[in-house]
Amino acid sequence: MRNNNNIKTKHGLIIIIAFIFLFTTVVYLLANTNENKTYEPQTSSTVNTEEKTKIFRSSSVMKFSITLPASYNIEEKFAKVTISAPIGDIYINQIGTNYDNFEEFLQWVKEENKLSLIEEKKLTINNLPAMLWQKTDERLYIIYHENTIYTISTKSKSLYTSLDQIAQSFRYTP
């Protein structure tokens, strides 16, 4: 009887150790999947300048690509991308929503946050419904794809032109 209990205890201990190992491995792999990514510049130019650009392809979690100036740095971490320019930052976030209707989602956000908008403009960005919201201190693009919301924003007025170009280059990449 005592031997049988020792065997059960050892089996339980082995199962716990295996679970901890598996859990640690999964966390490690997820963390490394979202490591910082930088990409080589391509030889295209932006719409308004002769500045070289590069294409950023996000991880398989965020599923998008954008074109941005080659001089900008980009970092992806856990459903958030930070684009650093010498004059400020642009942020791309991804969130899920239960709303099947983009218009209803936008209405809920405005009501919930009591937003005061200077400008509101419906857009289509690469066949995806989108919205441009201009607040007094921020410009924000909202892009919708199958219950997923992408926001692309900056509070730096001097980055509005870059933000517009980056948002227009947004592509969902399944």
Image (cartoon, rainbow, N blue to C red):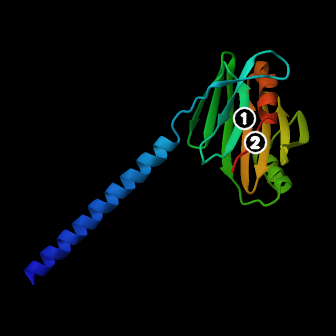
* Number of numbered discs on residues: 2
Q: In terms of depth relative to the viewer, which is nearer, 89 or 174?
A: 174
Q: Secondary structure at mark 2?
A: strand
Residue that badge 1 annotates: 66
Q: Is residue 38 left or right of 99 when viewed as pictured?
A: left
Gap between marks 2 and 1 measured at Cα: 6 Å
Q: Which residue does the image show at 58% across and 36% down from the upper left?
A: 76
| Image coordinates for residue 2, horizontal then vertical, percent | 8, 80
Graded by Cα atoms within 10 Å as few (under 14), some (14 to 19) or many (20 or more), the crowding at tag 2 reads some
Q: Residues within 10 Å of mark 1 (few under 14, many from 20)?
A: some
Q: Are marks 2 and 1 in contact (CB under 8 Å)?
A: yes
Q: Which residue is mark 2?
A: 171
Of residues 91 and 18, the one drawn nearer to the viewer in this rendering: 18
Q: Position of residue 168 (x, y in %)?
A: 82, 35
Mark 2 or mark 1: name the one nearer the start of the chain: 1
Residue at the left extreme, as displayed: 2
- In the rendered image, residue 50, in percent from the top left (x then y), is placed at 80, 15
